[in-house]
Image: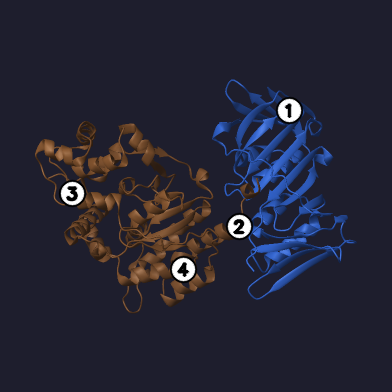
C-alpha cells in the first residue's frame, strides 16, 4: 500500500524561492489550521505551560502562537486572510473523512517527533496538542477579530477554499505547507511562511507545463500515487504515474490498463476538482488592529503571561502604524 | 583609485550621520565628492550624505564603490583626535582600506558592495512647509516628546505661523511651540504628520546643536531634514516615513 506523502508531490511541483521583499502589498489566503498548528506546537515546545493555562485549566497556547506568527505578515506588508476548516464531518463521505483525520494525526505526530528528536517528550506533546479544542478555535478567532485580520469560514477544507479564492483572483496567493493546494487549483502557493527566512513559491501553471499535464491529469497522477484521501497503487511513484497518465490520458484508462481498482476514486477526484467552497467571503486590505483590545483579550480575559506576548504586540503595532519610505516611491 | 586626507572630526561627524541608521553602507567615491545613501532595514528612515572634494585636504577618486562596516570604520577613525588629519587609501589589490594617522596605521577589510542593501530612490515629495531652526531647538522638542510618548506630531499652524512638536502620552502631553520669530525661517503650509521617536532620536544624535536645520513637512507625508556639514562643504539629508494617524 502506497500513500503519497508530501515528498512525492514535491518531486512534481515547480517550486522557486521568492523574497519577502517582492511580496509587499499582496493578500495571502492562509490555511488557518496548517498555520496555527505550526505556531501552537512551537509555543507548547518552548513555553512554560503556566504562561498559557487559565485558572479553569484551559490551555490557550494558540494565543501566544498567533501573536508570534502575525508580525511576519505585517512587517512585510502582507495582508493575511485566515481560512478556517469547516467541520470534517460535513464531508459527504465519512470514510474519507476518517482516513484524512487519522492521517493528519499521524503526520503531526511524526513532525513533532522529528522536530524534537525525543520520543517521550513528543508523545506528551502530542497528547496536549492533539486536536484544536473548541476554546482554541474560539479564542483564535477572537484574537484575529480584535486585530482586524479577515477570517473566512470554509464549508469543508480550508485549503480548498483558499485555493478557490486565489483561482478567482480575490487573493494573490495561498499560504500553506501542504502541496495539495496544487490539486485544489491554487495558481500560486507560498510555502514556509512559518519558517525563518524567505518563503517558497509553488506554481500550478509551471508544474503542469513541466510535465505536460492538465490539472485534471495532475489530480489523477496524485490519486495513482496516493493522497490524503486514498491509498495509491503499489509500486507507482510520481514518475511512473506521470508516464501512465500521459500514455493513457486519464485515471480510468490507467486503472483499466493495469487491471487495478482504487476505492472511491471518483469521490476523491471530485474532492479536488469540485470541492465544497463558498462565495460568502469578504477580503479587506485596510486592516487597522486594535492592539489594546487584543492585549486586553489575551492577557486580561484569558490570563496569558504578558511577557510572552508583549514583544509580538509591539512588533504588530510598529508594523501597522509605521509606514515605509517605499510607500511613497 | 581612491586616496584622500581629511580632518578627523569632519569625517567622524559625517559617518555619525549614517551610522545612527545602518551598520553597513556603500560609499561612492565619485570624482568630485564622496557620497553615501542608505536606508534602515525597515525602510523607514533614509540618509543621504555628500562630502564635497573641497571638504578634504586632498581628494582623488575615480568613481569606485566600496562597502564598509561603519562601526569598525568609526572605531579606526575615532583613534584620531578632532583636529588630526586622517589619510584614507584604497588598496585595489587587496580590497582593503588603509587608514593612517599620526603614527598609527590600520587596515580595514571591505564588504562586497553587492551584499549591502540596495540604496533607495528618493521619493519625489511635495512638502508644503519648510521650517528652518537650530539643531538645539529640534533637540529640545524631541527630548520633550520623549518624556511622554514614543512618537511626536510635527505640525505647522499656518494661520498662527508657528511650528509645533507635540506628543501625547497615556496620561501626559507636551507641546513645544516655536513661533516664526523663534525660527530662522518659516514657509507655512499644510503640514501635520506623526513620526516615531526611535528614529528621530537617532537622527537627532547626529545633528550638531549649532547646525542650521531645514525641516520640510507635509500632511501625512515623509519628513525631510537636512543640514550642512564640513563647514558647508557637505550636506546630510534624512528622510523619515510617517506613522499612520489612527484617530
Seen as rendered, the residue at the extreme top is B93
- The answer to whether B229 appears left or right of A52 in the picture is right
Q: CA distance from mark 2 to mark 3?
A: 51 Å
Q: Is residue B170 visible?
A: yes
Mark with earlier residue (2, 3): 3
- The residue that label 2 is drawn on is A322
The residue indicated by pointer 3 is A265
Q: Circle 4 sits on which residue?
A: A145
Residues indicated by labels 2 and 3 sit on the same polypeptide chain: yes
Q: Is residue A243 above or below residue B1?
A: below
Residue B147 on image: x %, y %: 68, 67
The N terminus of chain A is located in which quarter?
Answer: top left
Say which colour chain A has.
brown
Q: Are marks 2 and 3 in contact (CB under 8 Å)?
A: no
Answer with the quarter of the image where residue A251 lies: top left
The answer to which of B139 and B188 lies nearer the viewer is B188
Q: Are marks 2 and 4 on the same chain?
A: yes
Residue nearest the viewer, comparing B93 with A45 = A45
Amino acid at each position: 500500500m502506497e500513500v503519497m506523502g508530501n515528498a512525492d508531490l514535491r518531486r512534481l511541483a515547480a517550486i522557486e524561492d521568492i523574497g519577502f521583499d517582492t511580496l509587499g502589498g499582496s493578500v495571502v489566503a492562509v490555511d488557518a489550521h496548517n498555520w496555527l498548528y505550526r505556531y501552537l506546537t512551537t509555543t507548547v515546545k518552548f513555553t512554560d505551560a503556566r504562561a498559557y493555562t487559565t485558572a479553569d485549566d484551559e490551555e490557550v497556547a494558540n494565543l501566544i502562537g498567533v501573536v508570534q506568527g502575525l508580525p511576519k505578515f505585517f512587517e512585510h506588508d502582507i495582508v493575511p486572510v485566515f481560512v478556517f476548516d469547516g467541520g470534517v464531518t460535513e464531508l459527504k463521505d465519512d470514510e474519507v473523512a476518517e482516513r484524512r483525520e487519522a492521517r493528519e494525526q499521524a503526520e503531526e505526530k511524526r513532525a513533532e517527533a522529528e522536530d524534537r528528536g525525543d520520543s517521550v517528550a513528543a508523545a506528551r506533546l502530542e497528547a496536549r496538542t492533539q486536536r484544536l479544542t473548541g476554546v482554541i478555535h474560539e479564542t483564535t478567532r477572537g484574537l484575529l477579530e480584535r486585530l482586524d485580520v479577515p477570517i473566512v469560514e470554509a464549508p469543508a477544507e480550508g485549503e480548498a477554499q483558499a485555493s478557490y479564492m486565489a483561482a478567482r483572483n480575490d487573493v494573490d496567493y495561498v499560504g500553506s505547507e501542504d502541496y495539495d493546494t496544487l490539486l485544489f487549483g491554487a495558481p500560486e502557493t507560498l510555502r514556509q511562511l512559518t519558517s525563518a527566512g524567505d518563503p517558497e513559491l509553488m506554481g500550478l501553471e509551471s508544474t503542469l507545463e513541466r510535465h505536460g499535464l492538465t490539472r485534471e491529469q495532475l489530480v489523477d497522477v496524485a490519486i495513482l500515487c496516493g493522497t490524503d484521501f486514498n491509498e495509491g497503487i503499489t509500486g507507482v511513484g510520481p514518475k511512473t504515474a506521470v508516464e501512465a497518465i500521459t500514455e493513457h490520458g486519464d485515471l480510468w484508462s490507467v486503472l483499466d490498463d493495469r487491471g487495478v481498482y482504487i476505492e472511491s476514486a471518483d469521490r476523491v477526484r471530485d474532492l479536488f476538482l469540485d470541492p465544497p467552497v463558498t462565495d460568502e467571503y469578504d477580503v479587506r486590505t485596510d486592516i487597522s488592529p486594535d492592539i489594546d483590545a487584543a492585549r486586553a483579550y489575551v492577557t486580561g480575559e484569558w490570563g496569558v503571561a504578558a511577557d510572552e506576548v508583549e514583544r509580538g504586540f509591539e512588533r504588530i503595532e510598529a508594523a501597522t502604524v509605521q509606514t515605509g519610505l517605499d510607500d511613497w516611491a | 583609485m581612491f586616496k584622500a586626507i581629511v580632518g578627523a572630526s569632519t569625517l567622524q561627524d559625517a559617518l555619525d550621520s549614517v551610522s545612527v541608521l545602518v551598520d553597513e553602507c556603500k560609499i561612492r567615491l565619485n570624482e568630485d565628492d564622496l557620497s553615501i545613501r542608505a536606508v534602515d532595514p525597515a525602510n523607514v528612515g533614509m540618509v543621504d550624505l555628500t562630502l564635497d572634494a573641497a571638504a578634504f585636504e586632498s581628494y582623488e577618486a575615480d568613481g569606485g564603490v566600496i562597502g564598509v562596516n561603519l562601526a569598525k570604520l568609526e572605531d579606526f577613525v575615532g583613534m584620531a583626535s578632532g583636529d588630526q588629519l586622517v589619510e584614507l587609501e584604497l588598496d585595489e589589490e587587496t580590497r582593503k582600506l588603509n587608514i593612517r594617522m599620526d603614527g598609527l596605521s590600520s587596515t580595514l577589510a571591505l564588504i562586497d558592495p553587492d551584499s549591502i542593501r540596495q540604496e533607495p530612490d528618493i521619493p519625489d515629495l511635495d512638502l508644503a512647509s519648510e521650517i528652518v531652526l537650530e539643531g538645539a531647538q529640534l533637540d529640545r522638542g524631541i527630548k520633550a516628546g520623549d518624556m511622554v510618548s514614543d512618537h511626536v506630531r510635527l505640525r505647522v499652524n499656518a494661520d498662527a505661523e508657528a511650528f509645533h512638536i507635540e506628543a501625547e502620552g497615556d496620561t501626559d502631553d507636551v507641546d513645544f511651540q516655536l513661533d516664526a520669530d523663534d525660527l530662522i525661517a518659516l514657509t507655512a503650509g499644510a503640514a501635520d504628520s506623526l513620526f516615531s521617536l526611535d528614529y528621530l532620536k537617532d537622527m537627532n544624535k547626529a545633528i550638531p546643536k549649532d547646525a542650521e536645520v531645514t525641516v520640510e513637512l507635509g500632511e501625512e507625508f515623509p519628513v525631510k531634514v537636512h543640514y550642512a556639514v564640513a563647514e558647508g562643504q557637505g550636506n546630510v539629508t534624512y528622510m523619515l516615513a510617517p506613522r499612520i494617524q489612527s484617530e
